[in-house]
Amino acid sequence: MATIFSRIIQGEIPCYKIAENDRFFAFLDINPLSEGHTLVVPKQEKDYLFDLDDEDLGAMMVFAKTVAKAIEKAIPCKRIAVAVIGLEVPHAHIHLVPIRCEGDLDFKKEHLKLSTEEFQEIQRKITSAF
């Protein structure tokens, strides 16, 4: 059975796509910690990030770096934090989270509730920053 991320990649479930290449896909997290919170996933279904082979893991980080640089240009922040938790969806993924301080990366805090229009505007800002 395909993961929710595979279904997003295949276009079965809508998303706010940020970037894509032949191996990786980035889209806005619909339950964000901050504006611009983006997920980077491999198109290949692997449950755990460190089950990816070395070449794929390295290429995924380079792809994530490109996405992070666009987020930095589009969203006011001090840094783009990188988090790998991977318990909520059985598909390897990296969280890229714009932060101003370390407390901004607390996954236990209340997440933002954004409208469709707000998501679309964030998507537009980031995609035009590439």
Image: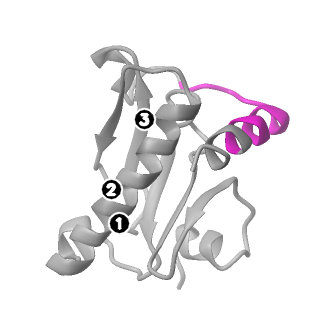
- Against 11, residue 35 (above or below) is above
Q: Earlier in the sequence, mark 1 or mark 3?
A: 1
Which residue bears the numbered disc 3? 97
Mark 3 Cα-neighbour bin, 10 Å: few <14, some 14–19, many ≥20: many
Which residue bears the numbered disc 2? 86
* x and y, in percent, of residue 97 in the image: 42, 35
Question: Which residue range is magenta in the image?
Answer: 111-123
Mark 1 Cα-neighbour bin, 10 Å: few <14, some 14–19, many ≥20: many
- Compare residues 70 and 104 and report the one nearer the observer: 70
The disc labelled 1 sits on which kind of residue? Ala
Residue lying farthest right? 117
Which residue bears the numbered disc 1? 92
Q: Are marks 2 and 1 in contact (CB under 8 Å)?
A: yes
Q: What residue sits 26% from the left and 77% below the top?
A: 56
* x and y, in percent, of residue 128 in the image: 67, 46
How many angstroms separate mark 2 from mark 1 (CA)?
6 Å
Residue 120: say if magenta: yes
